[in-house]
Amino acid sequence: MKVLISTALAGAFALGAGAAWAETTLNALFMAQAAYSEADVRAMADGYMKAHPDIKLNLEFVPYEGLRDKTLLAQGSGQGYDVVLFDVIWPAEYATNKILLDVSDRITPEMKAGVLPGAWTTVEYQGHKYGMPWILDTKYLFYNKAMLEKAGIAEPPKTWDELSAQAKIIKDKGIAQYPIVWSWAQAEAVICDYATLISAYGGKFLDDQGKPVFNEDGGLKALEYMKASMDAGLTNPNSKEYLEEDVRRVFSNGEAAFALNWTYMYNLANSGDDSKVKGQVGVEPAPGVEGISKVSAMNGSMGLGVTTTSKNPDAAWDFVVYMTSQKTQDAYAKLSLPIWTSSYDDPAVAKGQEALIAAAKVALAAMFPRPETPKYNELSALIQVAIQQALLGSATPADALTSAKEQSGL
C-alpha cells in the first residue's frame, strides 16, 4: 500500500515553513518487526490524520530484512517513498548515494536541546543530519527472576563470565536445558549481539584509519565467548538460526533464563497475552567484562527521513516531525522508548516499566557503534558468514574473522 496525503494548498512551499499543502500523495515505509508494533504506528498515523483532517495515510510495512532493499529498489524506479525508516548503519550509504535529504537546516533549537545527544548519531554522517531519530534502542539482558531464585542466585550477572557461571548452575540443576538464548541467525541480528560483546571486551570493528581490526583483541574475544557458550551447552543451539522474535518466543515460553534482546520484549514478555513468564521478567544493561567495562551496549537505533526523490518534502517532513515528537513518543513508550531526554523523568512514561527505564538510562549512554562506512552492508555480510563458520565449527574464530577481514577490501 502507498501512503496518501491530501491537503489544501495555503501559501508557498518553503523548507521548514508551516504552510498547508496542495493535494499530495506520499509513500511511507515502516518495519514490521521489533520496536513499535504495526498497530502502534497505525494509531500514531490516525492521530496525525485527526490533527490534519484533509490528510489520509496508508502505511506499508516490511520485515527489517527487506527494509533497505525496498527503499533502494523503489528509489531506483523513480516511484520511491517520501518517508522511510532507516537503520543507524545506513546514513553513510544513503548520504553517499543521495537517498535521503540533508535536513540539517530543518532541525530546530528545541530539537537539538531536547533529544538525547547519543540519539543524533543515528541519523548523522560527516556532520550532516539525514532525518530524525525515532526508534532509540540497544540490546538489554533479560532474565527470568523465578529461575534465578530457584537456582539460589541472588542477583543477575554483572559480567559475561558471571552470566556463564549462573547459566551453568541453572543447567546443572535441571531448571533449563539451555539457559541462554540469542539471535545469531546469519542476518544483521547476529551483528548486533556480536557488537554488544565487542563493546564489553573493549574491541573495535575498524581502526582510526578505517581498517578492519575485528579479528583481534576484543573482536576475537567476543566471538570466542559466543563459541564457548555454544560448546558448553549453555546457549540454545537453535540460536544460530534465531532472529529477535524467536528469542522473545523462547524466553516468553519459559524455556530460557537469560536473553539478549531489544526494548520491545520487556513489556511483551512481562505482561503479554502469550507470555508464560508474566511478572517474572527482569532487565539490566548487558554485562561488562571485569577490568574492561561495567556494561555493554550497541547502537540499534533507527531514524525517519525524507527521500531525495520526494516531490513533497515539506509535507513529508511535517509527518516525520509529528511521528518523532515527544508527545507522540511518550504516548507509545511501552515498546520503544522516547528519544527525548526529559521523557525519562516522566512518571507516566516510567509507569509499569521502571526497571526498564533504569536500565535504559545506563545502557543508552554506553551505546557502541557498528562500523560507519558506505560499504557497511558488504562488511556486515562477511562478518555474519564468519560468525556462522565459527559457531558451526568449520573454522576457528580467529581464522573465520581473518578471512572476513581479507575479503573486505578495506
Image (cartoon, grey):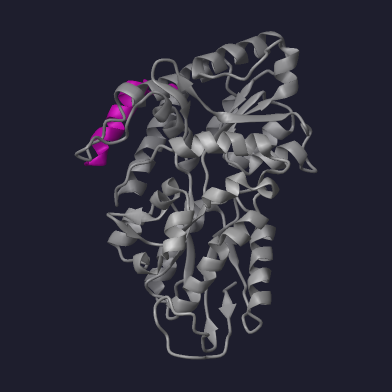
Residue 233: x and y in percent read 58, 16
- Asked if residue 212 lies left or right of residue 3, the reply is left
160 relative to 10, above or below: above
Determine the residue located farthest toward the left in the rendered image.
Answer: 209
Residue at 64% x, 50% y: name it. Answer: 333
**Can residue 33 be spotted in the picture?**
yes
Taking 277 as reference, is 90 left or right?
A: left
| Residue 28 x %, y % | 53, 69
Magenta span: 393-410
Q: Residue at x 70, y 17 (%)?
A: 148
Q: Is residue 405 magenta?
A: yes
Q: Is residue 69 visible?
A: no
For the image, the number of numbered tags is 0
Residue nearest the observer in this picture, 57 or 124: 124
Q: Which of the image's four quarters has the N terminus?
A: bottom right
State which quarter of the image contains the C terminus: top left
- Is 230 located above or below residue 350 in the figure? above
Q: Position of residue 117 (x, y in %)?
A: 42, 48
Query: x, y percentage for residue 290?
Result: 44, 15
Choose between 278 and 409: the one closer to the eye: 278
Residue 77: name its quadrant. bottom left
Residue 331 lies in the magenta stretch: no
Please tell me which residue is depicted at 48% across the width and 33% down the height of the picture: 193
Which residue is depicted at the point 68% across and 75% down?
50
Magenta: predominant secondary structure element?
A: helix
Residue 339, relative to residue 317: is it above or below? above
